[in-house]
Amino acid sequence: MSYTVAQLLTQDISFQPIEIKGWVRTFRANRFIALNDGSTIYNIQCVVDFENTDDSVLKRITTGAAVHIKGELVESQGKGQKVEIQVTSIDILGDSDPEDYPIQPKKHTFEFLRENAHLRTRTNTFSAVMRLRSSLSFAIHKYFNEHGFYYMHTPIITGSDAEGAGEMFRVSALDAKNPPLTDDGEVNYKEDFFGKETNLTVSGQLEAETYAMSLGKVYTFGPTFRAENSNTSRHLAEFWMIEPEVAFMDLAGNMDLAEDFMKSVLGYVLEHNREDLEFLEKRLLDEEKTKPQAERSDMSLIEKIKFVVDNNFKRVSYTEAIDILKNSKPNKKKKFNYIIEEWGADLQSEHERFLVEKHFKCPVILFDYPANIKAFYMRLNEDGKTVRAMDILFPGIGEMVGGSQREERLDVLREKMKQLDIDEEELWWYLDLRKYGTAVHSGFGLGFERLVMFATGMSNIRDVIPYPRTPQNAEF
Ligand code: 4AD
Ligand code: MG
């Protein structure tokens, strides 16, 4: 019978005949194959009877080769594993040239592995990261399913750019070299595929709101695109976002939901991805050893995740946060690049990280931001100057979640759109929600890759998505 490595490593030893297929990680002493098939971080040791195996076959057992092994599962003679396979026959399914196979059994830099992203999941680190990514996705769907949410697919091509969440990528079928022009010499998008200008979506929120106002509780989980030229370790041009949207829920309910949700999905991987987490925890420890003492974390990866799962997030208003920042050491000593002088300042990531990493030392939910630094759709507070916005900030990551209670009052929303010069005609359907059965509702967006970064301890967002899209880079 055919098994996976994960299955065999947890089998009772019964000397039964087994079959297995996988890739050779290492082959040493002409005898011991470390075999991996992606089912677990661990390899299974396969012991080749080299005296009865052709030299020509032995030569082809090289790192990276795909093999089909038949044998018996037996108690291991060696240290470090409970069981091993006594090979009775080995079939080389695909050779691998040992000279130029990029993934040699040694330490590679992440830069090198990014250039070989098609092969990097053959390393322990990237296979662990991608299994965790898969597991987190499942946990997210599971959470919403168990809490009465419907999964909604919002469009990827959008005709509205009113959200204002970021620069957009144009979608066009026009001939770029020779586009049709209007009388004023502008590109005539009326002749384009959709008869109007279209872009890749920056968020599914506005469409999700329409469904929340009929199905009650919905969420999206899909790709979103932003054409900002931000070449940082936390920005992608294509990333996945989870956006729940709930009718009759206010900002306090939104915070409760976000916190419960994040604790639940992180708790899921603590329970189900233990081996991968333990491996990544060791990797992170090794990486931290290379850093100066002051930059090292005093918690291990698993401790950090547990801490989030077991402790309440700190809820702090923007106004309180500004007071803390104004009186902080780095502000007074002018260590911040942007000095906080007065209420109304937009927070930069250096400020967010000060709050979570130095001041509160736990995830922080900042709420009630000044209206003029947030999006048009956020619910205006009674003070007339703040909106019911919330951002969730995480240690080591910064902003993980952005959300708000939505403005449900037609007149207030219209006024705001007028101020910001947002075309009512373009968002007629969004305004309709405020005309027909309007109600309090709220939601948020969680950047999936930032969650994966937190759960894996990886420090560059390019290393938690299979094929990262960043400025000047769309290989694979
Ligand atoms: O704060 P943002 O821009 O919020 C929205 O798009 C709202 N429409 C969400 C909502 O209320 N439904 O983005 C949400 C989250 C951020 O907090 C961040 O985690 C992530 O998306 N994010 C990015 N992740 C990777 N690369 C980028 N360029 C990102 N931009 C935002
Ligand atoms: Mg945001």
Image (cartoon, grey):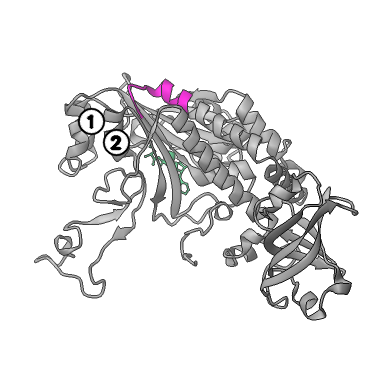
Residue 385 appearing in the image: no
Residue 413 is marked as 1
Q: Is residue 289 left or right of residue 254?
A: right
Crowd rating for badge 2 (residues with CA inside 10 Å; few <14, some 14–19, many 20+): many
Amino acid at pointer 2: Phe
Q: Nearer the viewer, residue 43 or 284?
A: 43
Quadrant of ligand 1: it is top left
Q: Residue furthest bottom?
A: 56
Examine the rendered structure and indicate whether residue 181 appears above or below residue 429.
Answer: below
Residue 145 is marked as none
Q: List the residue tagged with mark 2.
A: 376
Name the element at disc 1: helix
Which quarter of the rendering shows the N terminus?
bottom right
Q: Position of residue 375 (x, y in %)?
A: 33, 37
Residue 427 appearing in the image: yes
* Ligand 1 contact, mark 1 (Cβ < 8 Å): no
Q: Position of residue 311 (x, y in %)?
A: 62, 24
Q: Position of residue 135 (x, y in %)?
A: 57, 43
> Residue, x 29% and y 36% (percent of image)?
376
> Residue, x 84% and y 52% (percent of image)?
74
Magenta segment boundaries in residue numbering: 246-257
Q: Label 1 near label 2: C-beta < 8 Å?
A: yes
Name the image quarter holding residue 263.
top right
